[in-house]
Image: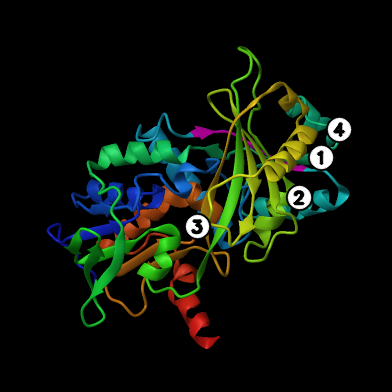
Amino acid sequence: MPPTSRSRKIVIIGAGIVGISIAYFLAREGISATIIDAEGPSAGATGASDGAVSVASKQPGLMMSLAQKARALYEQMASEGTLARQYKSRPTFLIGRTPEEIDILDEHARDLESVGEQITILDRSRLRSLVSGVGEGAFGGVMVSRDGHALGYQVTERLLALSGAKPNRNLAVTGVLLSDSRATGVATAAGNIEADVVIVAAGLGSASLARLGNALFPRKGQLVITDRGDLGQSALAGHLMTAGYIAAKRSAAKPAPSPIGLVIDPLVTGQYLIGGTREDNRRDRGTDAATIAAILREAVALYPSLRARRVIRTFSGVRTASRDGLPIIGFHPAIQNLLIATGFEGDGICLGPMIGKIIANLVRGLPAGTDISALAPGRLLAQASAA
């Protein structure tokens, strides 16, 4: 059993939304944790995300179910005041631009409806009445009424402040210390830090630290930010997501047919975040003119009002994807007191607080509260050793 005493030492590697959420939920139980990050809070994928707290975008089955629970936790934390300014409820509009894309959305709508989501099937006329200014190329779509939005770095800042933790910034962890197959701390550039429980939530760095072999790989995404537009200009009621993005998520472990999965996200600032790409095995953080131009062409075709906006920034983030398209969550099968929370790819913002709560439960020796058996690290380690 993992140690449960409040006097035990807990080390969290990674200061993204998952790592900080873990620290927050531990702090609520009076348990302090040492947070270590090679850069700082939200420096990785958390700070380079579109902020969708979305069931609409999830792979059917387990991921869709987890997203529903994660969204419910966001709603609860917002109503309690914890994330009142960070979380906003809004619809997601899934849009088909070809008959083939409409077929994808029809199937996806059935899956959403089967898990109790409130959806509305939109023909071309109804879509235009709800999404003013959508382009002629939009055949129809699906509205998912109860999705939401939260910028990852804002959630991280809020939960970090409430936790009272002071992250160790710019400190690289070079390894997990072991004694008789038991985690006893971490080695860092500034020396060793002892721990009774080590939690690895370090994105791509989790593979080497948690001895996950080739279970993880980088998936880069390039994005665009526009200016604020004119005062009084109406914004979209929710974000627009094309069926191409849905098709990629429905088979997340396979390469996408196109590197662009278009999302147009209206921000509370009046700006638009437009993305993005799914570039496998790319870990650089640069953007290139050809790719950004391709994203913008698709975006303007879908929502011509964007022609009136200026691009003020382009950026990219590197998501951590797993070989089977599912996150890796739970205790290491061969190393005691080593917990892992990684491989969220584009779902980390949505799932982050819920995963934090789950890992905090496991640290305390409690049930996860949600069935995560299918996400256990051993599944990928077993596959790797059998290969």
Q: Position of residue 15 (x, y in %)?
A: 35, 49
**317 lies above or below 196:** above
- At label 2, the amino acid type is Leu
Residue 3 can be seen, yes or no: yes
User: Which badge, 3 or 2, is on the more N-terminal residue?
Assistant: 2
Is 191 positioned to the left or the right of 358 in the image? left
Query: What is the crowding at mark 2: few (fewer than 14 residues within 10 Å), some, or many (at least 20)?
Result: many
> What label sits on residue 105 in the rendered view?
2
Disc 3 marks which amino acid? Phe
Looking at the rendered image, the quarter that the N terminus falls into is: bottom left
Question: Tag on residue 136?
Answer: 4
Label 4 packing within 10 angstroms: few (<14), some (14-19), many (20+): few
Q: State how far apart marks 1 and 2 are (Cα).
A: 9 Å
Packing grade of label 1 (10 A; few <14, some 14-19, many >=20) is many
Q: Amino acid at mark 4?
A: Glu
Tell me the SS state at disc 3.
Answer: loop
Query: The magenta stretch spans which residues?
Result: 88-95
Which residue is pictured at 71% across the width and 41% down the height?
295
**Residue 69 at x, y percent in the picture:** 48, 51
Considering every residue shown, the one lying at the far top of the view is 231
Q: Is label 1 in contact with label 2 (beta carbons under 8 Å)?
A: yes
User: Disc 1 residue type?
Assistant: Gly
Mark 1–mark 4 CB contact (< 8 Å)? no
Query: What label sits on residue 140 in the rendered view?
Result: 1
Residue at coordinates 47% horizontally, 45% vertically from top-left?
72
Where is mark 3, residue-wise? 344
Label 3 vs label 2: CA separation?
23 Å
